[in-house]
Amino acid sequence: MRQKRAKTYKRVMALYVQTFNFRQPFQVLVSDDILVMPAAQQLDIVKLLSTCVQAEIKPMITQCCVEALYALGPSHQRTTNLAKTLERRRCNHRTALPSDECLADVIGTSNKHRYVLAAQSAELREKMDRIPGVPVIHFNGRGVAVLSPPGVATVREKVKGEEERRLGEKAAEEGMEDGANVIGAQAGSVAGPSGRGRKGANPNPLSMRKKKVPVAAEGPKAEGSKKKKRDRNEEEEEDAEEEEKGVEAANEGEEAGGASRKKKKRKRRGKGEVALAIEELNATGLGGVKPIAKGGDESGGEGQESD
Ligand SMILES: [Zn+2]
């Protein structure tokens, strides 16, 4: 491969690495139609594809593409054998689909598995052009493996990614101070015609939050914190008061002679929980029953209990 072309291909693949997180070895989905090309037959197809993307590759072929080769019959035995040396990509198509459909399905709408496609079908290649992040290899008329330049959808994603990164850096640099919103707005108008750029400029929750802080700090910040403390104390007091009031209210609700019960309640509180429990036991008459467990002496319940 000529030096210039190698450099170009390396740069193209770098785009996929950067924007779409492609990682080496690149997974190359090999279509059956590229395997039947003379170039693929005569040369080591794996080495050829590897040279094309200027990196290590992991060639794969789908079940449907292998089926398509079988269907060509014994005259294509050599190609079929070649296909068998590649890793099989399970596509889960129960009845074999036409290769183009199978590959389009495996790649999907976002190429989430990050495949490089090696195929001859012009129709399929055109289709892939509309999906962001699908590098495509095919043999040109002279039997040379060609890596297509990135499609429109891919370039758009790349630009979007760069714009977002740039905005992020800018926000990190300047956003700390005032006017973070303004920076966002400026970048939005720069992004202009794409429309998507404007969307990218939106992540202003960051700057929104930052803007609010100084506004709050301008005024009575120190006083505010003091006030908060005071509020908390007041709240605590109020809570305590409310608790008591609540008890009172409940008592009053029960009967009109609440005043005496109120006193009783307060007294009880002072006694502590153990004393309260004993009192309650006695009140229900259970205190007298308890000694049974101790040996059947029913007479001196109260005295023994205090031990
Ligand atoms: Zn399939």
Image (spheres, rainbow, N blue to C red):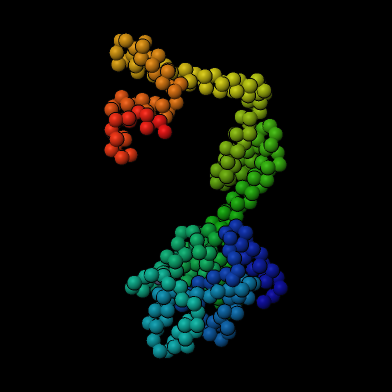
Q: Position of residue 255 (x, y in %)?
A: 29, 13
Residue at x 61% of width, y 29% of height = 212
* In this rendering, position of residue 62 left or right of residue 171: left
Quick one: quadrant of the N terminus? bottom right
Ligand 1's image quarter is bottom left
Residue 192 in sight here: no
Q: Is residue 290 above or below residue 17?
A: above
- Give the total of numbered labels: 0
Residue 99 quadrant = bottom left
Q: Position of residue 193 (x, y in %)?
A: 58, 44
Q: Nearer the viewer, residue 280 or 292?
A: 292
* In this rendering, position of residue 95 left or right of residue 145: left
Q: Is residue 194 above or below residue 276?
A: below
Q: Position of residue 180 (x, y in %)?
A: 65, 35
Residue at x 53% of width, y 58% of height = 132
Q: Is residue 293 above or below residue 262?
A: below
Q: Position of residue 135 (x, y in %)?
A: 56, 66
